[in-house]
Amino acid sequence: MNIQTVVTQPFSDQKPGTSGLRKKVPIFKQPNYLENFIQSIFDSLEGFSGQTFILGGDGRYYNRQAIQIILKMAAANGVGRMLVGQGGILSTPAASCIIRKNQAFGGIVLSASHNPGGPEEDFGVKYNISNGGPAPEKVTSAIYECSKVIDSYKIIEARNINLDQLGSQKIGEMRVEVIDSVADYAELMESLFDFSKISELLRSGKFKMCIDSLHAVTGPYAKNIFEQLLGAPVGTVQNGMPLEDFGGGHPDPNLVYAHDLVEIMFGDNAPDFGAASDGDGDRNMILGKNFFVTPSDSLAILVANAKLVPGYSSGLAGIARSMPTSAAADRVAEKMGLDCYETPTGWKFFGNLLDADKATLCGEESFGTGSNHVREKDGLWAVLFWLNILAARQESVEDIVKEHWKTYGRNYYSRHDYEGIESDKANTLMENLHSLLPSLPGKQYGQYEVRYADDFSYTDPIDGSISQKQGIRIGFSNGSRIVFRLSGTGTQGATLRLYVESYEPDANKQDQDTQVKLSPLVSLADEIAQIKNITGREKPTVIT
Ligand code: VG1
Ligand code: CO
């Protein structure tokens, strides 16, 4: 075996964010940049010699090259066996599934999720631990610490592996198994949902749906599950071929970036059901005929209807949502007598709750929903959950949501993103807000009286770890709330996220336009945080 030890110097910017290390491709392609980070992962781990790891990505530009480098480094670092998705493809939830199924030591997932791909766009690396979930903060901090002092990395001199051919190959002493990217995941889905009932619905001819994979990783998964296993007509999955640049699009399933699907679902003769997922397949957007389901409502509806789904019909241990997610799910949990946990943004915070069986379903406002079946959020899982509910209830998406609001009240909800603002302006805005916090409680702004104002801090109920500064929340006495935080996944400047929520229990007032309903709160958010003044932006980049 020809192991080389290559001398290197640390890069100062390899601190993982909300979900892994994300940078522009030219940064990742600098000599030693990817290598340093991968070596830092191995340096931070103990006891992995001879063990199994999982490797794959969302197929974006640089995926295949990075995989070849990582395979050679893994072999040089003593990994025993590496399972790689065919063609280098693994969706984030499939990677989680495969780590768990094979009791692997961990996995490396190459993705910048919903960020664009291409030679000048984004690339990313995430490390997942043996439970299949994103590395918790203590692991990512350890990786970062290693990246600051690294002086060499190990790599083996070997031929490239053929990533397209299924089966076992060898690099040095390490076995590389190229595996079917879809099979294990599809099998898991089949074990959770009533495939025969869903299939009946999809074949009935009375129900039409459209799935948009946005030229990202879910294409092969969606085609296999919906068109082959469930018998939906060929063509149900659109933009189903993963492309290195996602066809020039932004693989983010929201009303702005999934415009092809939005046009179809809000056009004449719209299908009954529509869904899209993101670059790495862990997000979902759910649409009905001329109807958008907010992700926060979606979580609440899945919880309320879980008894209709075989994998969850025996009951839920509890639920969890990220702090900026609306309280819609809390209202269901309260009625059902379930514990409801509020965590910081990012799926890594759900891992301990899922492992300890404190929560069964989890969700984030950012189009993320999932359960204890894996340790990542899962886009197609959410689509199947919805289809299972639709097949069981035989009602439209819109009727189900409106019925839900009648029972539990409606949490009007919206997120306003200001993307790519200058970092120092974003920091000034957050610092100003921070210093205002003590003076806010009790203050009256028109009809709104501030009940609390704080910077969210979370103590993990399982391991006691504390995560501070997770977003500024201002709550009002009428149940409304505004939240401010800076994104931890962007690669250019800063992204300010403003989350606005207002609760409406009166069934006669649940049909208002969301932006109209929330506009007084949005103005108030601007008044308190001085968004326009400080950022110079007249309006947000994306509203969902
Ligand atoms: C965003 C979302 C967050 C999500 C994260 C990763 O983070 O707000 O809810 O968990 O992306 O999702 P931020 O820090 O930019 O707000 V994904 O689909 O990128 O793995
Ligand atoms: Co994602």
Image: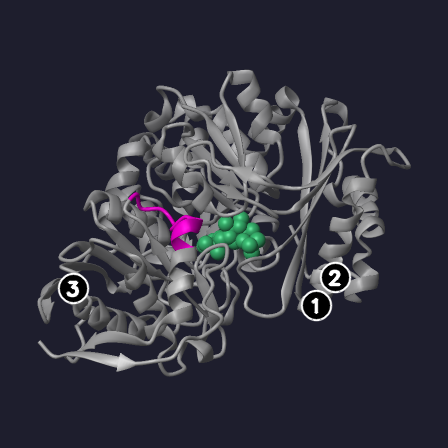
Comparing 225 with 164, the one in front is 164
Q: Distance between the residues labelled 2 and 1?
A: 6 Å
Q: Which amino acid does label 1 sit on?
A: Asp
Mark 2 and mark 1 residues within 8 Å of each other at the beta carbon: yes
Q: Where in the image, quadrant-wise, is ligand 2 located? A: bottom left
The part of the image, by quadrant, that contains residue 198 is: top left
Near mark 1 (Cα within 10 A), the count class, few <14, some 14-19 or many ≥20, is few
Q: Where is residue 328 in the image (x, y as percent from the top left)?
A: 61, 30
Q: Is residue 367 above or below residue 207?
A: below
At numbered mark 2, what does the secondary structure look like: helix, strand or loop?
Answer: helix
| Residue segment shown in magenta | 131-140
Q: Looking at the image, tell me whether mark 1 or mark 3 is earlier in sequence order.
A: 3
Q: What residue type is labelled 2?
A: Thr
Q: Can residue 95 be seen in this view?
A: yes
**Residue 78 image label:** 3
At numbered mark 1, what does the secondary structure look like: helix, strand or loop?
Answer: helix
Q: Does the magenta stretch include residue 540?
A: no
Question: What residue sits right under mark 1 in the picture?
Answer: 424
Question: What residue sits right under mark 2 in the picture?
Answer: 428
Asked if ligand 1 lies within 8 A of label 3, the reply is no
Q: What residue type is labelled 3?
A: Gly
